[in-house]
Image (tube, helix red, strand yellow):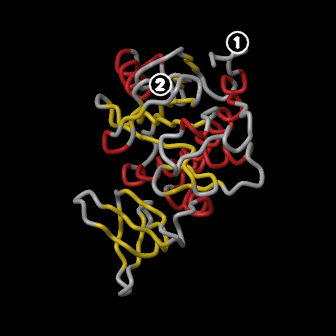
């Protein structure tokens, strides 16, 4: 599946720069490089888009490959100088909330939710992952990548816990998906800049399917925390209550919804 000849007009109406590329190893890696080389050409919400990402990257330096045309990868430039440093942990979460709404708009009747901190699930299966990286040369610039499984067939899914629009029987409108996502991202980042976590917490909480679930969290030191995800703290971290009533705050970790 090639890049649509009509381009992405809806997305271009929201973003000041939409760079569509035939194939790339990693949209995040390329955009990091491009922004460092020419920052003035990449204002807030500039995008790099492809349907053929050869070496996608996720949290903890994980990589993956998807068949060409089966997924859309988009990376966005976020100029976050107006967002307080202590509120920037909310950025992947508001991106997830924006993507939840964009995906749900084309999957009516499906349960679409954010899995803390950076996955989007449809009926409990992952359709999108999100990765935020700070530009090394400018701590007030974040490159935010998202990969969405669009036309991927069931047989091509990397794991049984993944899904796609095609598996749901939907021929997704990618332009609408991206424009909805970037528009939501624009509004939530602006709200975060003005009101901090308190301005976006309710939106994220409403869309976060992790809250209320029994979870198993693998922490960065490889220990495991098992309990109930009860809420997000003021910094967007996950609060997990264990069976003995003790609450632990999780800032980073791999979360599995046990039930």
Q: Which residue is nearer to you in this view: 258 or 177?
A: 258
Residue 14: image x %, image y %?
A: 66, 29
Mark 2 residue element: loop
Inspect this view and state whether residue 141 appears: no
Q: Left of 11 or right of it: where is 201?
A: left
The crowding category of the residue bearing disc 1, from other C-alpha atoms within 10 Å (few below 14, some 14 to 19, many at least 20), is few
What residue is pinned by disc 2?
Answer: 53
Name which residue lies at 45% across and 46% down: 83
**Is 9 rendered above or below residue 246?**
above
Residue 108: image x %, image y %?
A: 77, 50
Pointers 2 and 1 in contact (C-beta within 8 Å): no
**Is 29 rendered above or below residue 97?**
above
What residue is pinned by disc 1?
Answer: 5
Q: Left of 48 or right of it: where is 37?
A: left
Q: Which residue is nearer to you in this view: 43 or 163?
A: 163
As drawn, the residue found furthest toward the bottom would be 244
The label on residue 245 is: none
Name which residue lies at 53% across and 30% down: 74
Residue 244: image x %, image y %?
A: 35, 87
Q: Left of 83 or right of it: where is 177?
A: right
Q: Left of 108 or right of it: where is 39?
A: left
Mark 1 residue element: loop
As drawn, the residue found furthest toward the right would be 108
Q: Nearer the viewer, mark 2 or mark 1?
A: 2
The crowding category of the residue bearing disc 2, from other C-alpha atoms within 10 Å (few below 14, some 14 to 19, many at least 20), is many
């Amino acid at each position: 599946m090639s890049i649509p000849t009509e381009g992405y007009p809806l997305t271009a109406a929201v973003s000041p720069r939409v760079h569509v590329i035939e194939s790339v190893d990693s949209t995040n890696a390329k955009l990091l490089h491009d922004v460092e080389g020419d920052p003035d050409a990449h204002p807030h919400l500039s995008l790099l888009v492809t349907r053929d990402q050869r070496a996608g990257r996720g949290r903890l330096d994980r990589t993956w490959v998807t068949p060409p045309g089966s997924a859309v990868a988009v990376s966005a430039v976020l100029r976050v100088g107006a967002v307080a440093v202590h509120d920037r942990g909310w950025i992947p979460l508001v991106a997830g909330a924006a993507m939840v709404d964009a995906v749900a708009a084309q999957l009516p009747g499906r349960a679409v939710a954010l899995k803390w901190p950076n996955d989007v699930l449809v009926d409990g299966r992952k359709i999108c992952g999100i990765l935020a990286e700070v530009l090394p040369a400018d701590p007030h610039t974040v490159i935010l990548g998202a990969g969405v499984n669009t036309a991927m067939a069931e047989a091509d899914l990397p794991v049984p816990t993944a899904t796609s629009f095609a598996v749901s029987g939907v021929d997704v409108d990618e332009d609408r998906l991206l424009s909805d996502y970037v528009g939501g991202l624009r509004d939530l980042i602006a709200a975060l800049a003005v009101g901090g976590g308190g301005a976006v917490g309710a939106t994220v909480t409403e869309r976060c399917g992790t809250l209320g679930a029994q979870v198993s969290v693998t922490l960065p030191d490889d220990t495991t925390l098992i309990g109930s995800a009860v809420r997000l703290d003021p910094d967007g971290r996950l609060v997990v209550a264990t069976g003995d009533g003790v609450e632990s705050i999780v800032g980073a970790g791999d979360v599995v919804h046990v039930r």
